[in-house]
Amino acid sequence: MRCYLCGSCDFTPRKGVVRDNPALHVLECKSCGLVQLDSSAHIQPGHYESSNMHPDESLERWIAGTAPDDDRRYAALEESLAGKRVLDFGSGTGEFLRRAARVAASVAGVEPERRAHQLYRDGIQLFPSLEAIPATAAFDVITAFHVLEHLADPREALKSLAAYLNPGGRLIVEVPSASDALLTLYDSDAFSRFTYWSAHLFLFTPETIRRVIEQAGLRAAAIEQVQRYPLSNHLYWLSHQKPGGHERWGFLDSPALHAAYTAALAAAGKCDTLVAHIER
């Protein structure tokens, strides 16, 4: 196989297994640093439409699980959404768009998972795919939160999304980081066996996501380090080798502590999430 980004055939294996498909392997390109699975053949047409990403999760649990991220994203982007036409690619249950609708001129989503479609109402326009969006449609802000890593060709997805941007518009992409502290700083064996799964075809660093953006003919105005999970979660992984520390040990967290911990990880390039602000 070849690296999606640079075409190299020289990889090194990453520690850990793909928990839902041990036949797959996680590889890191020695040339450019892109982390990818050794195959994407398991993602067949209709995979996401048929709820294969959330096979055992109720809609209620899905909504509750994304609420902290929806709140964080809305708080970070509220000013840039005000008065704008907004499209969310991979909009899930639509909860981020419901928040964005408080200030945006209009909101729309692209979500392939069919069972989520029943949740879209209250003026939120829904498209089942990018191809379903009218060619004449245009948006000021397009978001894609934890979507690109699921796609076999993220470069082409960025090109397609950018075609719907108004002049001066911005595309905001959030992806999990290949340099997550639990993987590359704390070297948690338990986390490395937990975090890789078959729906994540790629993991990015700031350098590799910037390169994908540039190969799509776009420009990254900024790439931010964002920490989704707090110190309590990391301590719990190191102590108990399990997730959920932010729920069980949440008393350890505070906004000030989380901000300081995020700043320290960001300075080292070890946050768990990257947010790219992209211009045409």
Image (cartoon, rainbow, N blue to C red):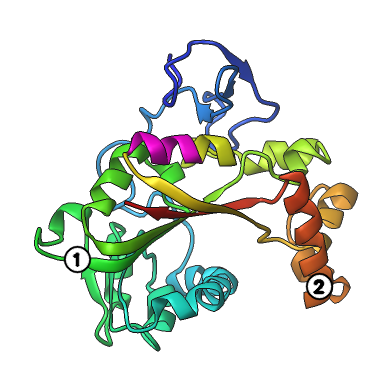
- Alpha carbon of mark 2 to alpha carbon of mark 1: how far? 42 Å
Is any atom of residue 201 visible in this view? no
Query: Callout 2, which amino acid?
Result: Gly
Q: Regarding mark 2 in the picture, which secondary structure is present there?
A: helix
Q: Is residue 165 magenta?
A: no
What residue is at 31 percent from the left and 63 percent from the top? 168
For the image, the number of numbered tags is: 2
**Most prominent secondary structure in the magenta stretch?**
helix
Marks 2 and 1: which is nearer the front?
1
- The quarter of the picture where residue 181 lies is top right
Q: Residues within 10 Å of mark 2 (few under 14, many from 20)?
A: some
Is any atom of residue 245 visible in this view? yes
Query: Callout 1, which amino acid?
Result: Ala
- Residue 125 in the image, given as x and y percentages of width and height: 22, 75
Disc number at residue 138?
1
- Residue 87 in the image, given as x and y percentages of width and height: 30, 67
Q: Which residue, given by chain and number where applicable, does mark 2 sit on?
A: 250
Q: Nearer the viewer, residue 238 or 173?
A: 173
Q: Regarding mark 1 in the picture, which secondary structure is present there?
A: loop
Left or right of 210 on screen, residue 50:
left
Q: Which residues are magenta?
A: 210-216
- Residue 216 in the image, given as x and y percentages of width and height: 33, 38
Disc number at residue 153?
none
Q: Is residue 29 above or below residue 207?
A: above
